[in-house]
Image: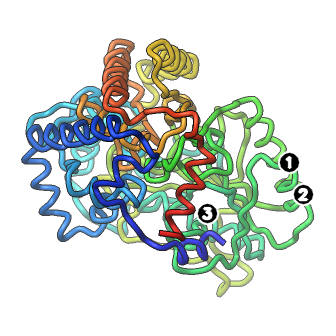
Amino acid sequence: MAKRLARMLPGYHFDEQAFFKCDNAPIEIENLRKQGFFKLADLLTSRHPLSIAASAEAREHISDMQFISAYRVPFQFSPLVQAHLKVGSFLASSSGVCVTDLDGQSFYDLTGSYGVNVFGADFYKKTMAEGMAKTQVLGPVLGAYHPCVTANAERLKRISGMDEVSFHMSGTEAVMQAVRLARYHTRRKNIVRFCGSYHGWWEDVQPGPGNPMPPRETYTLSDMSEHSLEVLRTRKDIACVLVNPLQALHPNVNAPGDTTLIDSSRKAAYDRPAYTQWLKKLRQVCTDSGIVLIFDEVFLGFRLAAGGAQAYFGVQADMVTYGKTLGGGFPVGVVCGKKQWMKRFHTDRPADICFARGTFKEHPGVMGAMSAFLDQLETPEIQAIYEGLDDRWDARRKRFNDTMAAHGLPVQAANMSSVWTLFYTEPSRYNWMFQYYLRTHGLALSWVGTGRLIFSLNYSDADFEAVLQKFVQAAQEMKADGWWWQSPMLTNKGIRRSILKETFFR
């Protein structure tokens, strides 16, 4: 249904007149917004000319950058934003919890490198250098293995509680192989994912908009639902269930980005006991029904606990996938699984195999950096970071929310440890503008804006306090510029009705 609606949705955009008053704000608010918008545009352009110029040049040749620049904000606003609010995509250096662009402008890094950066950029510079030094004599010899591969596999078995390990080139590829093995051994073709979850961009796990193929062997069920458990109990064609534990922050909703901030209805919350109980029920149903339970920890692995989400929730999967941070700064994917699910052939049927290869999957440099990462994971310094981790980040989230409320600002945060999302407490069509005010105050965001903030675990209390004050300053400026203007007639329901009229009756 979503794909049909996506094909039917007509494109339109606001001209400059409509852009600043699509919520029927009075003329004085419209003028405030115009002044604030072009002040932001001038500030970004004057501070970051080299970064913006490099990004504009690269965008002509790199299709990913074209997509990102077009989908930072709701599409109605995108043309004017692209024309004036220029954002650089290039950086020159990183240190501590900060990154620096081509113009020498420093930002506190809230991107987390899409989940890679768990322990801080300096940590990964070290593991990358140690990994290359460890394997440099062998160089890019592929097919045969560097000796550190064996040690990596042994340590991953201990961490995951599994019997065997398979290396791959990305998290997406690791999930693909885990699903393929589950289908091979169960002789069932269908897989289950939960609504809103992300398991990579390949066809079986992304059945909605963005995938030109229709869903075939994929059931998308409701997360944390007894009805979903009943489906798993009764159907006999399900090979595996994929779980992305991050959905505990926003079950049954797509990972939030500012491109979908059409009003203030976005919400998020995390109830660890409730989600733990759900996972335990799911584990039991999968066991009873012969379904392979796969934990996709490509994003969250090693962020919640040294033993990953399995250890954090106290639930043992049949297979678990890792990626991102485990490569010590290099690309990697890993499948760890129980012996019965990992074997790729049957000795009594020699032609019956489950094929999987990949030229670079045990690249010596990557395996060396992984070895260095696993070495560091066992040190007292890193183990100490995990002590009281939830309490530390929950306290920071409370301080954030209390501070924003005390200043009368309509912004709140929800978190799952160091992974945060912002939501907004008053109806507005312009919440997505907040990302640009945050950038001018020296906060680096990923292209999804305020939908996902990822703190590295080396943030000190002083670092966090500095970030918090920048949030306050940015929000105060946005409020002063009129973007959070309020009217008794302005409601989330009313905003959605206005958008419906704009879409089909312009």
Q: Secondary structure at mark 1?
A: helix
Check disc 3 and report the residue beneath it: 178
Residue at point 34% right, 47% down?
A: 20
* 1 and 3 marks in contact (CB < 8 Å): no
Check disc 2 and report the residue beneath it: 230
- Nearer the observer, 300 or 352: 300
Closer to us: mark 2 or mark 1? Answer: 2
Q: Secondary structure at mark 3?
A: helix
Determine the CA span between mark 2 and mark 1: 12 Å
Q: Is residue 341 left or right of residue 371?
A: right
* 2 and 3 marks in contact (CB < 8 Å): no
Residue at point 31% right, 60% down?
A: 15
Determine the CA span between mark 1 and mark 3: 20 Å
Closer to us: mark 2 or mark 3? Answer: 2
Q: Earlier in the sequence, mark 2 or mark 3?
A: 3
Check disc 1 and report the residue beneath it: 284
Which residue type does callout 3 highlight? Ala
Q: Decide: is 186 above or below 161.
A: below
- Nearer the observer, 372 or 2: 2
Which residue type does callout 1 highlight? Gln
Q: Earlier in the sequence, mark 1 or mark 3?
A: 3
Question: Where in the figure is residue 448, as x and y percent of width and height?
Answer: 41, 48
Q: Earlier in the sequence, mark 2 or mark 1?
A: 2
